[in-house]
Amino acid sequence: MILTGAGMSAESGIATFRDSGGLWDRYPVEQVATPEGFAADPGLVLDFYNMRRHELLKARPNGGHLALAAMEKDFEVQIITQNIDNLHEQAGSSRVIHLHGELMKARSTGDETLVYELDPDDCDIHPGDCCEKGFQLRPHIVWFGEAVPMMAEAERITRQADIFVIIGTSMNVYPAAGLLDDVRRNVPVYLIDPKDVVTRRYDIHHIRKGATEGVKELQRLLT
């Protein structure tokens, strides 16, 4: 099982959120990533995610994404990502769970079961864009303060994992960071990140590299 965070996509040019100079330094999280922020200024929030969407359309999977997809030839690879981009899918990974939603989708504010794929050629969401029931559309993103619908499935998969890999995440964002507690005892854990990452486990093999070079080293260690 591979748990990926913002560092996975940084080499593809996707802005991180928590690093110095990241998105949260430029946009207060309360304004653009909470239900309250959306209620207060939906236009601002929609524009924020429209910008993120256009940024994603210019990005391409990096070597790390491609290497994870290639590992499906030798392993049963399940990716659980905190990222809202679709770069894992673009790279060819076939089993991807998005904990925090998907940027290239919209959903109804009045019926959360109504989820729509956005056309890359016309992907902006504007005030007044509505679902077939007449409710405003919003980004298909899990905001702070909202439930994480895929968390139970992620926990189930983690408890079955024979190898657990963490790539490019600070392990500070819950409930995703709590997946480490679901890893069975004696299951090897690998962490790919050039920076120090504090966890409650001390038996982690830390590969101090970025996503592309780190996944290459992981492949060497596992084969």
Image (tube, rainbow, N blue to C red):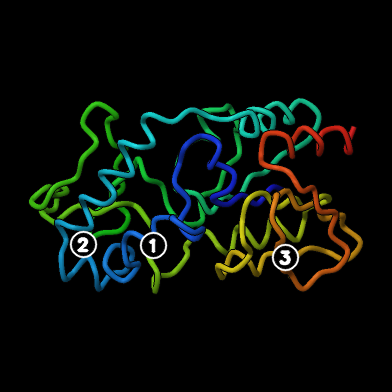
Q: Which numbered disc covers residue 180? A: 3
Q: Badges 3 and 2: C-beta atoms under 8 Å apart?
A: no
10 Å crowding of disc 2: few (<14), some (14-19), many (20+): some
Q: Which numbered disc covers residue 148? A: none
Q: CA distance from mark 3 to mark 1?
A: 28 Å
Residue 4, percent across and down? 61, 49
Q: Upstream in the sequence, badge 3 or badge 2?
A: 2
Q: Which numbered disc covers residue 110? A: 2
Looking at the image, is 121 positioned above or below residue 16? Answer: above
> Image check: 55 left or right of 12?
left
> Image check: 209 left or right of 151?
right
Secondary element at tag 2: loop
Residue 111, percent across and down? 25, 59
Q: Amino acid at mark 1?
A: Asp
Residue visible at 53% across and 54% down? 82
Looking at the image, is 79 positioned above or below residue 62? Answer: below
Q: CA distance from mark 1 to mark 2?
A: 31 Å
Task: Say which quarter of the image contains residue 50.
Answer: top left
Q: Amino acid at mark 2?
A: Gly
Q: Amino acid at mark 3?
A: Leu
Residue visible at 29% across and 49% down? 49
Looking at the image, is 7 positioned above or below residue 155? Answer: above
Q: Upstream in the sequence, badge 1 or badge 2?
A: 1
The residue that label 1 is drawn on is 25
10 Å crowding of disc 3: few (<14), some (14-19), many (20+): many
Q: Upstream in the sequence, badge 3 or badge 1?
A: 1
Q: 11 and 43: which one is in front?
A: 11
**Quadrant including the C terminus:** top right
Q: Residue furthest left?
A: 128
Q: 208 and 59: which one is in front?
A: 208
Q: Nearer the viewer, mark 3 or mark 1?
A: 1
> Image check: 161 left or right of 46?
right
